[in-house]
Amino acid sequence: MPPPNPPVGLTLENAGFTAAGRVILSDLTLSLTEQRIGIIGRNGSGKTSLLRLLSGLVAPATGTVRVDGLDPARDRKAILSRLGILFQNPDHQIIFPTVAEELSFGLHQQGMAKPAAKAAMRAMLAQHGRSHWEDRPVTALSQGQRHFLCLLSLLAMKPATILLDEPFAGLDLPTQSRLTRTFDALPQRLILITHDPAALARYDRVIWLEQGRIRADGPPTTILPDFTTEMTRLGEVDADTDLSD
Ligand SMILES: Nc1ncnc2c1ncn2[C@@H]1O[C@H](COP(=O)(O)OP(=O)(O)OP(=O)(O)O)[C@@H](O)[C@H]1O
């Protein structure tokens, strides 16, 4: 049960995450209440691990994680309507053989009756010009198309917060442009991991992770120029000498 008058948003208190005996994230204290939050950082800096922690797919080794006051690792069912995650690799997400089944599954999980779920599934495909996908086996879709299907499944469930792990990777430019417009128009809170600083220019807040810790946190106008300068500087040296991994 959520506590009375639960805090709205996602919070971490001294949260840390350990995997295979290694500290991956340490000492994260964050209150995520803005509508548009970007997460940036180098490969291996801990961005995906942070999304996994926020969505309750992994439990913190230290500290606490809360979504609207709930523990996402324990209150799995209550989390479904509050939070949805789009992984980098669609094959980690898709479980059903056809597009229709994959799209309807989350809606059933949320308690929607079969006819209503079918209508919602068809409406979602039609809205995005993909009605012809309905009976297609997911194996007949390309990697980019499977990624897009995962996104449609997520949007159909209308979670209050959407966590996106590099959603544009592998998508063609028209699909990226349309998706950007779709994201911009969504009323939900978005937390977006990207390697493209330009995608975050109009965001409310940007968090820069480095080796599992927060290196900088603030508005894009302050964080993005520093990040771009640092990435350019690192790109000009021939090898990484500062990474432990
Ligand atoms: N289950 C795990 N077991 C062992 N190591 C892990 C595990 N999960 C993540 N790691 C390690 O944690 C570090 C952070 O990984 P993570 O995927 O969170 O990085 P990232 O910032 O999302 O990287 P990228 O930009 O490449 O997607 C990496 O060094 C990775 O090897």
Image: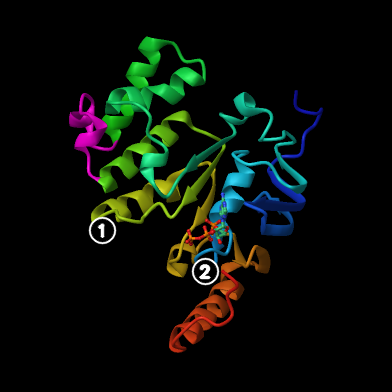
Disc assigned to residue 173: 1
Q: Which residues are magenta?
A: 128-142
**Residue 185 on image: x %, y %:** 43, 46
Q: In the picture shown, does residue 1 fall above or below 86?
A: above
Residue at 37% x, 42% y: name it.
90
Q: Outermost residue, front direction? A: 21
Q: Label 1's element? A: helix
**Residue 22 on image: x %, y %:** 66, 58
Q: Which quarter of the image is occupied by the N terminus?
A: top right
**Residue 133 on image: x %, y %:** 21, 31
Q: In the picture shown, does residue 200 fall above or below 135?
A: below
Q: Outermost residue, bottom direction? A: 237
Count of marks overlaid on the render: 2
* Apparent side of residue 17 relative to residue 204 in the rendered image (left or right): right
Question: Residue flagged by tag 1: what amino acid is it?
Answer: Leu
Residue 66 placement: quadrant: top right
* Apparent side of residue 228 relative to residue 33 in the rendered image (left or right): left
- Label 1: how many residues lie within 10 Å, few (<14), some (14-19) or many (20+)? few
Residue 130 placement: quadrant: top left
Q: Label 2's element? A: loop
Ligand 1: image quarter: bottom right
Q: Outermost residue, right direction? A: 4
Residue at 50% x, 63% y: name it.
202
Task: Judge: label 2 CB < 8 Å from ligand 1.
Answer: yes
- Foreground: 197 or 219? 197
Q: Which numbered mark, 1 or 2, is in the foreground of this view?
A: 2
CA–CA distance in space, label 1 to label 2 = 23 Å
Residue at 61% x, 52% y: name it.
50
Disc 2 marks which residue? 42
Residue at 68% x, 51% y: name it.
17
Q: Is residue 180 magenta?
A: no
Prevailing SS of the magenta stretch: loop
